[in-house]
Image (spheres, rainbow, N blue to C red):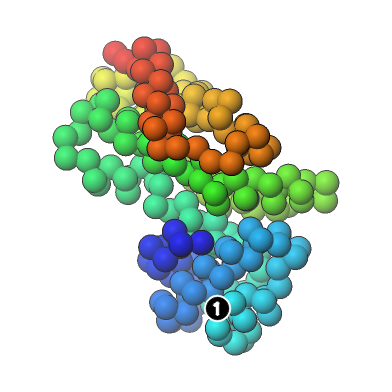
Amino acid sequence: MNQLNKLDTAATSQSGRGRPRDTEKNAAIVEAAACLFLEHGFDGTSMDEVAKRASVSKQTVYSHFSSKEQLFSASIRAVIEQYYPDSVLERVETHSLEADLRVVCESYAHLLMSEEAMAMFRVLVAAAPKGPNLAQLFWNAGPQEMQDRLESFLLSRTQKGELVIPDIAVASNQIVCLLKGKTHFMRSIGLIDSISEDQIQRNVDNAVAAFLKLYRA
């Protein structure tokens, strides 16, 4: 997963047993684990395989992450970290409501349609008959915090008087649904192999226009 190469800082923020971290090894472990989880699922991935893929010892893996569950959570957080609204908004020069909303929506759309997101969706669907534990780990590690930060973004714009939103949680869910549309479903079940940048931008255009029509002050 090449996206993880950008995320050394996110990976090193995860604590295993309180020891100082070798950042390169930590990032290598997280990247290796993420690849293996997507290739083989949670049950099909072992800490031995992670150590081999990361070119470190099994003891080193456990010195950074005390369990496979913790490593799974760290892998999800590392991928998702770059898409948080407060991170992407740092790249915006003119902070108008529409410009900021568009940047946030673009970030979410790229995540939702990414190869990693599609692969993880399939991993979770395959694991669903065994119970919700893996899905709960995934939800807590990434989507829940992303949803919280999206709600925070919308709340701040509501408090500024730019948006009128009676229910922030409902509004944030609407953004995600608008961005997914039928394209996400078709991609997740394999009806389409990829989505072009032009298609993503059209989805974002439509989502932003619809959302502002509903909630612009």
Judged left or right of residue 213, residue 122 is: right
Q: Please name whichever residue, 35 or 135, is drawn nearer the observer in this view of the structure.
A: 35
In the rendered image, which quarter contains the C terminus? top left
Judged left or right of residue 38, residue 215 is: left
Amino acid type assigned to the residue bearing label 1 in the image: Ala
Position of residue 182 measured from the top left corner of the image (x, y, whole percent): 58, 25
Position of residue 8 measured from the top left corner of the image (x, y, whole percent): 40, 68
Kindly state the secondary structure of the residue where label 1 is placed: helix
Residue 17 visible in the snapshot: no
Q: Please name whichever residue, 8 or 32, is drawn nearer the observer in this view of the structure.
A: 32
Which residue occupies 46% across, 72% down? 27
Which residue occupies 62% across, 75% down? 50
Which residue occupies 43% across, 81% down? 22
Q: Quadrant of residue 157?
A: top left
Position of residue 70 measured from the top left corner of the image (x, y, whole percent): 61, 65
Judged left or right of residue 156, residue 203 is: right
Query: Extreme right residue here?
Result: 129
Number of callouts: 1
Query: Extreme left residue here?
Result: 94
Up/down of 174 relative to 151, above or below: above
Q: Please name whichever residue, 3 or 66, is drawn nearer the observer in this view of the structure.
A: 3
Which residue occupies 59% across, 64% down? 35
Residue 2 visible in the snapshot: yes
Up/down of 126 relative to 179, above or below: below
Residue wearing tag 1: 54
Q: Quadrant of residue 215?
A: top left
Graded by Cα atoms within 10 Å as few (under 14), some (14 to 19) or many (20 or more), the crowding at tag 1 reads: many
Q: Quadrant of residue 161?
A: top left
Up/down of 75 relative to 89, above or below: below
